[in-house]
Image (spheres, grey):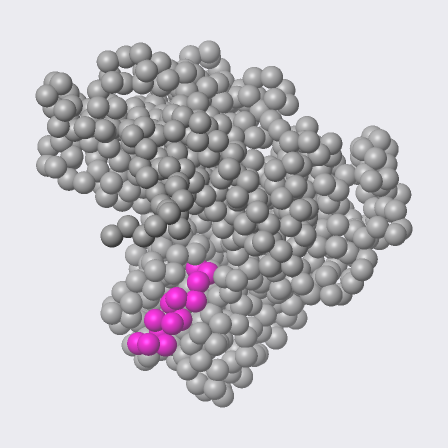
Amino acid sequence: MLRLDKRPQPSKRWNWATPFLAVLLTMIAGGFLFMALGKDPFIAIKLIFWDPLFNPQVADYSRPQLLVKAGPLILIAVGLSVGFRAGIWNIGAEGQYIIGALCGAAVALAFWPAEGWYIFPLMVLAGAFGGWAWAMIPAILKTRFNTNEILVSLLLVYVAEKILAAMSVGLMRNPDGAGFPGSRNIAQYPAAANNELIADTGMHWGVVAAFIAVIFTYIMLHRHILGFQVQLAGQAPRAAKFAGVAPARLVVLCLGFSGAMAGLAGMFEVSGPARLVSIDFNAYYGFTAIIVAFLGRLHPVGIALAGLLMALTYIGGELAQFTLGLPSAAIQVFQGMLLFFLLAVDVLSNYRIRLKTHEAA
Amino acid sequence: MKRRTLIATSALALGLSALGGAAMAQDDPLKVGFIYIGPPGDFGWTYAHDQARLAAQEHFGDAVETSYVENVPEGPDAERILTQMALSGTDMIFATSFGYGPAVNAVAERFPDVAFEHATGYQQESPNVSLYNARFYEGRAVIGHIAGRMTETDTIGYIASFPIPEVIMGINSAYLHARAVNPDVRFRVVWAYSWFDPAQEAAAAEALIDQGADILMQHTDSTAPLQVAQDRGALAFGQASDMTEFAPDVHLTAIIDNWTPYYIERIQARLDGEWEAQNVWHGIPEDEVTFAPFNDRIPDDVQAEAEEMIESIRTGEYHPFTGPINRQDGSAWLEDGEVAPDSDLLGMNFYVEGMSGEIPE
């Protein structure tokens, strides 16, 4: 019989190996899933993991798209990971993403059609501010009235969605759009557009910001007292109190930081890849980023890799959908498997598996 | 592979004139892609498009190969999927939601040899972007007439999605024709701010019935309002497809989106090398707007009147927006006998005289 013994310290070796093991297990289980749907599992797996990167017909396009898709996921997830480490659960990044995008777009639309170098930086500030402000609602409610930040931040997503819809058909509607919903095309407004910095690389300011955020967060977590406080508050709340960590301050900081990151992601998205404010502008980046944060083990570098992997399954999944006729639900199950196996094989890094020689009493 | 290189080298240079014949190898099927905003199983908007895709596939057999991607959010995801479809050798793409407009136009510019068909849009920035839409208001006129004749409480409940011209046009059309046969009729409108949200649509249906509505109409895609009507004993009309099986007792009829004739016609044109971009708005005369079988609960004389109205719209003898019609504020819109120009309908942002309530901004 097998027996699990808890390791005193998580195994470093397994910590590195488990993500790869999880991907491998996902491929095997996913292969069976695709086979059950009557598709060739090897072709499906190849379409998802190989073709977006190396198929000569599409790879030149889809490789840069990995960055475009992963950029906002990484930016949001890095922001969330700091709070998650401290046990502060911002589930409403989707809402902060929307409000950040709306604030950024509002600046662009207010200046339209003026030219000026200052417009884009102002939009960046407005985007970060919008996300921050939206996250301050659960933060203040938690610190003042001890409400649950999980519920408040989540429910504010739905409020943000309604504001987005109202803006798309109301205040921000394109006056030249014949009454159709949606704002002016911000990506076609040079002073405000967040276009590719180098053609055909997928690099736009949002991707740059994501990588800056990864580095910044890494340094903060590992070299700064605030990072220490965050880790302490998450692992040993009582010890944190004795060490002089003010819980309220930490809540405000963590929610504010994650909100600002989500707001930035929304702003870069609305002025670049998404092009305009529209009713369904938000595409679950804020929720997917929660998965990315955990897939990356709340570590900034891990999150960057997890974001790219997640983007790969999206882009490859789309290829598999229209070349093999796989339903989108199958791709979602496949993505779910990835998270499931990652969490499941965690057992290997936290426990030692031993062969039991005799029944214990 | 051969055809693709041919397209890349010659057709790109030749531009639109190379569409069809010359670039088409005889043994390869024409590849036609579809992107859907929802799942084909929604029994509403996407279901109707997918039915037409299947019908076209059956009609053309081996000459055409269709594929689709479902649940594609509007924005960057749509743009990426359209690009990957084009890169993978798709010859013709149907984008079946309004919000795909900016993405369709951006991708069409990069792939001048791919024919794009965009449903319900308004932007045509490249010569290979075609627009198509259906005159659903013609259907709404007929169900408005039936509702006006059958209501006992003189109150019709209307579940609207977003305050945009398409939806406002439908409300006005239904109201005008209900009032024509029942001067006391009142419309109560609930704005769901969603196209597909079963829970919210059900709640709206409950609220409308509580306010005295005995007949429901919807401009949202789920079957939830019908199921509420079935439980509460109110009458209702289906949306986009025949929804009888969800509310067999109270489903009076449904306006059916029948895209099949259009899809077959356009794919045929592409096969023949005669495809050209256009902007069409078909309706009852072209069988793009049809009706589910009338429920026996509609009295015979009302059924006959409805058939008569359908016939007069089919022959072009009657236009549902024929003056005199005033705006809600009393100002004149259409003179006696004047027929509404399409541009007025496509930009409609006002209620007609007699409607109560305000269109939300």
Give the total of numbered labels: 0
User: In this rendering, is residue A255 above or below A218?
Assistant: below
In the picture, measured across the screen, residue B17 lies left or right of residue B68, that is right
Quadrant of the image for the C terminus of chain B? top left
Residue at image position (63%, 20%) is: A199
User: In this rendering, is residue A116 above or below B197?
Assistant: above
In the picture, measured across the screen, residue A45 lies left or right of residue A307, that is right
Which region shows up in magenta?
A: B220-232
x and y percentages locating residue A29 in the rendered image:
54, 50
Residue at image position (71%, 62%) is: B56
Residue at image position (16%, 34%) is: A142
In the picture, measured across the screen, residue B100 lies left or right of residue A357, that is right
x and y percentages locating residue A135 in the rendered image:
26, 31
x and y percentages locating residue A253 in the rendered image:
23, 23
Assign the magenta stretch its main secondary structure: helix
Q: Residue furthest bottom?
A: B300
